[in-house]
């Protein structure tokens, strides 16, 4: 049992929810007045009471982001290697019970996708697969990383959780970061949304960032799928997880993403809708809670929203994303994991950033600062 499992089991979901919704304007003002903010302050900043202070949150979030990250915006692209999956998940187009055409890229097809991404200017790539240990297990991932890594400055992956020894095998091949989203920290609802497959093991997934930290990975990405449960409560538990990890694996960098449920094959309606205004509140709350954290926004969000939110705390954006295996060159019409909303080209995104006074950064900008 990891230390974080002991930490999270000390918290009751309903009690945390009651705490968040009972926060007052006085609690919000107290949180805004501090230079160093606690998890209790974070509860106040994500509470309904903080909505009236959104302008204050936005101004402080912008100030802190510029102070730490400057006017730089890192750009990256996902590279989907496979849509094969052994799990049943109620919200995902790759779910085992979806009768879709499955595809895993060959070495030659990987080369074609790499060439397409290089032509678009990317240096930071996120490898994505479904969770299928036999088809896209460690041998496949190792071969793919070794093949792709020489072409890019930074390589991360979002695949099935692995054992400690497996991460220790992949990191020397050139793996810089791993994204592993808990989806929801609500244990009962987690089981409802993951009824079959290895992913149904709540605690094995929960322990994954600990295994990554023990393996010495350079960056860990966290997040909850917004819409599966109450976003405020899930966001608190994500912040709790982040706080624990930073204290335990202090040499590792961390990022937070904000995926909202998007349409897909067999779609699931969100249990709780999150408005654009609430997403801005959450982004700003994370920045006020943690000045070092990288905050990432995907092409799930609309063009209009992404244009406006870049100055409020976000430090990393995907661009020109394809969420299907071979989507850039090999098989543009294969099934997507979810529908993207911002379909602008990477070049158009970069121009938009420059027009707003930001510098689009194709490489891993933090390597320059370190």
Image (cartoon, rainbow, N blue to C red):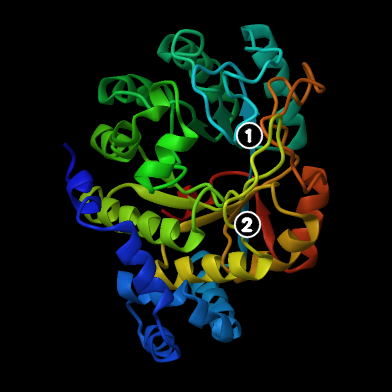
> Helix, strand or loop at disc 1?
strand
Q: Is residue 177 visible?
A: no
- Residue 238 is situated, as x and y percent measured from the top left of the image, at 39, 54
Q: Which residue is mark 1?
A: 78
- Residue 329 is situated, as x and y percent measured from the top left of the image, at 79, 21
Q: Is residue 28 visible?
A: yes
Q: Relative to residue 134, is residue 346 depicted above or below?
A: below
> Helix, strand or loop at disc 2?
strand
Tag 1: Cα neighbours inside 10 Å, few (<14), some, or many (≥20)?
many
Cα–Cα gap, marks 1 and 2: 16 Å
The residue shown at (68%, 54%) is: 360
Q: Quadrant of residue 312?
A: bottom right
Q: Which of the labelled discs sits on residue 123, or is there none?
A: none
Q: Relative to residue 66, is residue 366 depicted above or below?
A: above
Q: Which residue is mark 2?
A: 73
- Residue 349 is situated, as x and y percent measured from the top left of the image, at 78, 52
Which mark lies nearer to you, 1 or 2? 1
Q: Nearer the viewer, residue 72 or 297?
A: 297
Is 276 on the left-hand or right-hand side of 345?
A: left
């Amino acid at each position: 049992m990891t230390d974080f499992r002991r930490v999270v089991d000390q918290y009751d979901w309903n009690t945390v929810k009651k705490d968040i919704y009972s926060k007052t304007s006085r609690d919000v003002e107290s949180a805004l007045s501090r230079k160093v903010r606690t998890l209790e302050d974070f509860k106040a900043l994500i509470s309904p009471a903080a909505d009236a202070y959104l302008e204050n949150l936005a101004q402080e979030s912008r100030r802190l982001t510029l102070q730490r990250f400057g006017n730089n915006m890192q750009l990256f692209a996902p590279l989907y290697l496979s849509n094969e999956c052994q799990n049943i998940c109620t919200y995902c187009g790759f779910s085992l019970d979806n009768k879709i055409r499955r595809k895993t890229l060959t070495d030659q097809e990987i080369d074609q996708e790499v060439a397409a991404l290089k032509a678009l200017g990317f240096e930071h790539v996120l490898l994505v697969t479904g969770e299928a240990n036999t088809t896209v297990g460690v041998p496949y991932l190792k071969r793919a990383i070794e093949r792709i890594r020489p072409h890019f400055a930074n390589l991360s992956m979002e695949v099935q959780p692995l054992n400690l020894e497996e991460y220790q095998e992949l990191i020397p091949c050139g793996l810089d970061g791993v994204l592993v989203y808990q989806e929801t920290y609500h244990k009962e609802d987690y089981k409802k949304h993951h009824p079959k497959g290895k992913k149904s093991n709540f605690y094995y997934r929960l322990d994954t960032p600990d295994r990554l930290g023990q393996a010495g990975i350079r960056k860990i990405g966290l997040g909850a799928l917004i819409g599966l449960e109450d976003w405020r409560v899930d966001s608190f538990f994500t912040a709790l997880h982040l706080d624990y990890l930073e204290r335990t694996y202090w040499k590792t960098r961390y990022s937070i993403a904000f995926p909202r449920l998007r349409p897909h094959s067999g779609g699931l309606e969100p249990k709780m809708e999150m408005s654009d205004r609430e997403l801005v509140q959450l982004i700003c709350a994370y920045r006020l809670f943690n000045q070092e954290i990288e905050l990432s926004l995907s092409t799930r969000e609309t063009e209009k929203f992404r244009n406006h939110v870049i100055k409020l705390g976000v430090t990393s954006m995907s661009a020109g994303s394809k969420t299907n295996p071979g989507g850039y060159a090999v098989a543009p019409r294969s099934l997507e994991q979810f529908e993207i909303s911002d379909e602008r080209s990477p070049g158009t995104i970069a121009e938009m950033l420059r027009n707003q006074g930001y510098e689009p950064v194709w490489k891993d900008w933090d390597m320059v600062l370190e």
